[in-house]
C-alpha cells in the first residue's frame, strides 16, 4: 500500500517540478533564439549598409570586390543589369530563384546611387549557420532537461521515502500493538469461555470456583483494555494531562499507603524516604503522576521475591523532583533495559506473571514525557533495579 502511495507521491512531486522546468526551458529557448535571430538581422543590416556605401564609392563595380565579400562573409551576390544576369554571378539564375523562394536566406536588393545605372545587386545571406547554432542549442537543452528529469525523479523518490518513513514506522507499530493486544485478550477470553462452559455442568458447590475465575479474568481484561486505551490515546497525541500545583510528598505517601497491603501480603518490606525540608509545589497532573508511581511500585513488588525490599525515595535538587523506586529483586539485564519501555515487552523472567501485560512502563514513559520529564532505569547496588522519574 505504501509503495503505491510512494510511487504516486513521486510522480506528483517530480511531475510538477518537471512541468515547471520544461515550461521555463521553453521560454528561455524562445527568448534566446529570438535574440540570436535579431542580432543576425542587425549584423546583416550593418553589412549591407557598408557594402552599399562601398559600392557607391566605386565608379565601376569590381568583381574582385564582390567575390572577396562572398568569400569573407558568407554572402551571395546576384547582379543583373537591366534584368540581364551578369556573367560574374557565382550562382545560376535557377539556383538564385530557388534559394530566394526558400526561407533559408536573408535577402535584400541594392540599387547603386547612380541614377543612370540599371544595376540590381541582390544579396543573399545564408541562415544555415544560425539554424545550426539554434539546433545544437536545442539539442543541448533537451539533454540537460532529460538529465534534470532523471535527477528530479530520483530525488523525489528518495524524498518521498524519507517523508513516508515515520508513517510506515507508525503503521508497523500499530500493527504490532494490535497483534499483541489481540494475543493478550485471547487468553482471558479462552479461560472465560471454558469456565462458563464448565459452569453449566458443574455441581453447585464447584460453581463458585468457576465464577471466581470468570471474575478474575474479566478484571484482567478490563485492566488490559484500560491500559490499551491510555496508550492508544497517547499515540494520537491526545495524552492530555491537567497539571496543577501539587505536593509530591503527599502524593507519594498516598501511593505508599495504597501498596502497603500488597507488600505485606508478599512479605516485602516497603519503605518511603522523604526530604526533611519543606518542598515547593510541583506543577503536575496528580492522577497521572500517581499512576506512574503505582506502576513502578507495583513492578518493584511483583519482581522482588518474598523477603525482599522496596524503597521509595524523593529528592529535590535544582528545581527538579527525583522520584526513585529501588528494589532488590530479579533485576533487569542490559539487553532488556533497552526494550522494557516498548509496548507489550516483557523480559523472559517476567513472562510467567499473569497480571502483567508489558504495558505499564510504556504508559509511565508517555505520562512522564507529557510532563516534559524523563524516566530511566539502573541496576541497584547489590542486585535489583532502580527506576528514577525526574520532573
Ligand atoms: P509489566 O506489566 O509486564 O510489568 P511493564 O511495562 O511495567 O510491564 O514492564 C516491562 C518489563 O520490564 C516487565 O515485564 C519486566 O520484565 C521488566 N521490569 C519492570 N520493572 C521491573 C523491576 N522492578 N524489576 C525487574 N524487572 C522489571
Image (spheres, grey):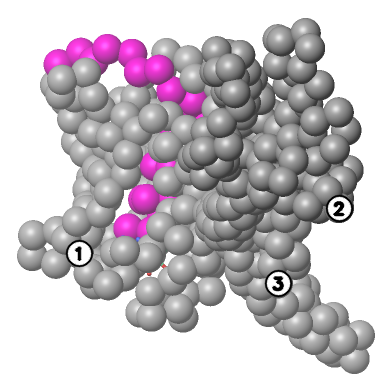
Q: Main secondary structure of the magenta part?
A: helix
Q: Which residue is mark 1?
A: 384
**Which numbered dot is residue 94?**
2
**Left or right of 1, for residue 138:** left
Q: Is residue 47 magenta?
A: no
Query: Which one is nearer the viewer's eye here, 286 or 249?
Result: 286
Q: Regarding mark 3 in the picture, which secondary structure is present there?
A: helix
Question: In terms of depth relative to the viewer, which is nearer, 38 or 327?
Answer: 38
| Residue 322 seen | yes
Q: CA distance from mark 3 to mark 2?
A: 93 Å
Rendering quarter of residue 113: top right
CB of mark 1 near ligand 1 (< 8 Å): yes
- The mark closer to the camera, 1 or 2, is 2
Q: Earlier in the sequence, mark 3 or mark 1?
A: 3
Numbered circle sitting on residue 274: none
Give the camera-side residue of 90 and 243. 90
Q: Is residue 39 left or right of residue 9?
A: left
Q: Quadrant of the N terminus?
A: bottom right
List x then y, in percent, for residue 194: 80, 86
Residue at image location 58% in from the left, 37% down from the top: 63
Q: Which residues are magenta?
A: 277-300
Image coordinates for residue 228, horizontal then vertical, percent: 64, 55
Residue position marked by numbered label 3 in the rendering? 182
- Residue 30: x percent and y percent? 70, 33
In which of the image's four quarters is ligand 1 placed?
bottom left
At which x and y percent is residue 385?
A: 22, 59
Amino acid at each position: 500500500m505504501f509503495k503505491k502511495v510512494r510511487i504516486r507521491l513521486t510522480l506528483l512531486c517530480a511531475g510538477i517540478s518537471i512541468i515547471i522546468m520544461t515550461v521555463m526551458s521553453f521560454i528561455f529557448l524562445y527568448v534566446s533564439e529570438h535574440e540570436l535571430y535579431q542580432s543576425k538581422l542587425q549584423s546583416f543590416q550593418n553589412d549591407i549598409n557598408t557594402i552599399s556605401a562601398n559600392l557607391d564609392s566605386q565608379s565601376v563595380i569590381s568583381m574582385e570586390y564582390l567575390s572577396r565579400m562572398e568569400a569573407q562573409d558568407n554572402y551571395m551576390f546576384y547582379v543583373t543589369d537591366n534584368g540581364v544576369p551578369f556573367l560574374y554571378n557565382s550562382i545560376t539564375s535557377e539556383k538564385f530563384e530557388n534559394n530566394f523562394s526558400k526561407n533559408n536566406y536573408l535577402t535584400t536588393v541594392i540599387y547603386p546611387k547612380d541614377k543612370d545605372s540599371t544595376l540590381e545587386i541582390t544579396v543573399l545571406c545564408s541562415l544555415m549557420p544560425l539554424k545550426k547554432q539554434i539546433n545544437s542549442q536545442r539539442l543541448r537543452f533537451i539533454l540537460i532537461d532529460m538529465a534534470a528529469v532523471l535527477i528530479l525523479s530520483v530525488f523525489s523518490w528518495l524524498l518521498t521515502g524519507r517523508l513516508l518513513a515515520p508513517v510506515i514506522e507508525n503503521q508497523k507499530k500499530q500493527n504490532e500493538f494490535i497483534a499483541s493486544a489481540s494475543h493478550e485478550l485471547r487468553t482471558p477470553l479462552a479461560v472465560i469461555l471454558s469456565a462458563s462452559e464448565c459452569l453449566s455442568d458443574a455441581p453447585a458447590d464447584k460453581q463458585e470456583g468457576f465464577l471466581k475465575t470468570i471474575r478474575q479474568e474479566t478484571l484482567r481484561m478490563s485492566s488490559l483494555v484500560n491500559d490499551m486505551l491510555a496508550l492508544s490515546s497517547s499515540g494520537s497525541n491526545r495524552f492530555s494531562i491537567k497539571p496543577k500545583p501539587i505536593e509530591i510528598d503527599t502524593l507519594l505517601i498516598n501511593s505508599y499507603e495504597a501498596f502497603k497491603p500488597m507488600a505485606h501480603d508478599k512479605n516485602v518490606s516497603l519503605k518511603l524516604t522523604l526530604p526533611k525540608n519543606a518542598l515547593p509545589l510541583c506543577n503536575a497532573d496528580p492522577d497521572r503522576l500517581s499512576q506512574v508511581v503505582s506502576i513502578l511500585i507495583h513492578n518493584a513488588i511483583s519482581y522482588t521475591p518474598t523477603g525482599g525490599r522496596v524503597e521509595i525515595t524523593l529528592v529535590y535538587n535544582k528545581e527538579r523532583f527525583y522520584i526513585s523506586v529501588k528494589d532488590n529483586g530479579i533485576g533487569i539485564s542490559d539487553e532488556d533495559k533497552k526494550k522494557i519501555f516498548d509496548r507489550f515487552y516483557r523480559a523472559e523472567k517476567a513472562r510467567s506473571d499473569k497480571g502483567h501485560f508489558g504495558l505499564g512502563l510504556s504508559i509511565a514513559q508517555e505520562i512522564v514525557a507529557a510532563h516534559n520529564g524523563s524516566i530511566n532505569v539502573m541496576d541497584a547496588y547489590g542486585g535489583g533495579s532502580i527506576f528514577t522519574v525526574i520532573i
